[in-house]
Image (cartoon, helix red, strand yellow):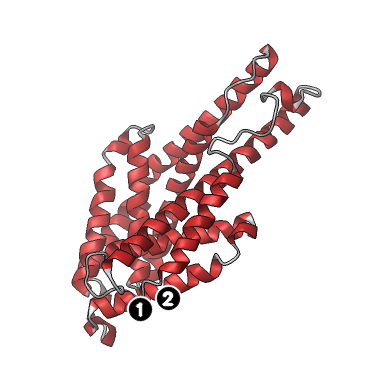
């Protein structure tokens, strides 16, 4: 199993470092996106193999990756928010305010991009990458005596994934009625389970059969996407409401309809209700798979 862990982590770290070249341009959205995915997968690998690789360096490296992931996450959120902003209303005054809102959002988005670029150019991030490479290749965890290391990977992986699966099914049991924070936690758990299952998707014996494992990965991805769309829409509506409130005060009573088109709040992803239906369908399929 140590070799499997090393291979997964080395691939994730390589993918991340490969995208650093694209980050030289602070507005390279795809490079930021791929870099963020590589960090997420690396964190998932560390969590998946934690019983085997936990040592004196584990918590520090995990926390440093969480710090870096937070910076990349802020970029992602601002990129999506900027893309979801509605077009200006036709009125001249409204168009001017809408352009101000778009400009404010764009400035925050570029600051988030620049924060990542500056962090990666700093000593903290460089030390993190070096320490990770050394730890993955020759960490103290390799010298610790543990019976887990000797276990066959199908049994180990099946047990770990089974627990994650049961946790996710339990958390999502009342998905349609859950609050935003609880839905976000389900999204995180679905994402982790998906990545972990992908790590061992080609290993025989991990699940009852490979078809079920593939279905599980697909359901997790769809569940994650639907809940992510809901979160993005909620963030956009919150931003608009806050911006309108501030703008109204500053403009001595400028109304919401003077900034946004008349009608219900914009729904760039088809509406929360529609995405929630997708999430519930994906969860129901997931809960019925019983892959382990």
- Residue 130 lies left or right of residue 85; in this view the side is left
Q: Secondary structure at mark 2?
A: helix
Q: Which residue is located at x 54 percent, y 43 percent?
A: 232
Q: Identify the residue under disc 1.
A: 159
Of residues 251 and 37, the one nearer the viewer is 37
The quadrant of the image that shows the N terminus is bottom left
Q: Residues within 10 Å of mark 1 (few under 14, many from 20)?
A: some
Q: Nearer the viewer, residue 89 or 130?
A: 89
Q: Is residue 150 at all visible to an observer of this figure?
A: yes
Query: From what the image shows, is residue 246 above or below residue 9?
Result: above
Residue 227 seen by the camera: no
Image coords of residue 224 (percent x, y) = 46, 54
Q: Position of residue 152 (x, y in %)?
A: 22, 81
Image quadrant of residue 85?
A: top right
Looking at the picture, how far across and down is residue 61, in whole percent?
Answer: 37, 64
In the rendered view of the protein, which quadrant contains the C terminus?
Answer: bottom left
Whole-Å distance between the Cαs marked 1 and 2?
6 Å
Horizontally, residue 43 falls left or right of residue 279, namely left
Mark 1 secondary-structure assignment: helix
Residue 163: numbered disc: 2
Residue drawn at 40 percent across, 66 percent down = 60
Question: In terms of image quadrants, where is residue 67?
Answer: bottom left
Q: Is residue 241 above or below residue 207?
A: above
């Amino acid at each position: 199993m140590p070799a499997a862990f090393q291979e997964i982590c080395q691939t994730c770290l390589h993918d991340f470092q490969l995208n650093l070249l694209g980050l030289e341009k602070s507005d390279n959205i795809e490079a930021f996106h791929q870099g963020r995915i590589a960090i997420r997968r690396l964190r998932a690998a560390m969590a998946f193999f934690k019983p085997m690789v936990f040592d004196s360096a584990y918590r520090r490296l995990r926390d440093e990756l969480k710090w870096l992931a937070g910076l990349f996450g802020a970029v992602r959120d601002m990129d999506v928010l900027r893309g979801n902003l509605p077009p200006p209303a036709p009125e001249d005054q409204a168009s001017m305010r809408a352009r101000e809102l778009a400009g404010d959002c764009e400035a925050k988005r570029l600051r988030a991009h620049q924060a990542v670029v500056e962090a990666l150019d700093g000593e903290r991030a460089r030390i993190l990458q070096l320490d990770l490479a050394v730890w993955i290749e020759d960490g103290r965890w390799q010298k610790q005596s543990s019976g887990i290391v000797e276990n066959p990977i199908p049994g180990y992986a099946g047990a770990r994934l089974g627990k994650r699966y049961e946790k996710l099914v339990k958390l999502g049991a009342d998905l349609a009625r859950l609050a935003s924070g609880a839905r976000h936690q389900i999204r995180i758990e679905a994402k982790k389970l998906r990545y972990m299952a992908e790590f061992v998707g080609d290993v025989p014996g991990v699940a009852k059969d490979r078809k079920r494992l593939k279905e599980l990965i697909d359901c997790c991805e769809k569940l994650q996407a639907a809940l992510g769309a809901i979160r993005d829409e909620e963030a956009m509506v919150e931003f608009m409401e806050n911006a309108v409130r501030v703008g109204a005060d500053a403009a001595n009573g400028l109304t919401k309809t003077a900034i946004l088109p008349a009608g219900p709040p914009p729904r760039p992803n088809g509406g929360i209700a529609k995405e929630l239906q997708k999430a519930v369908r994906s969860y129901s399929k997931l809960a019925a798979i019983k892959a382990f």
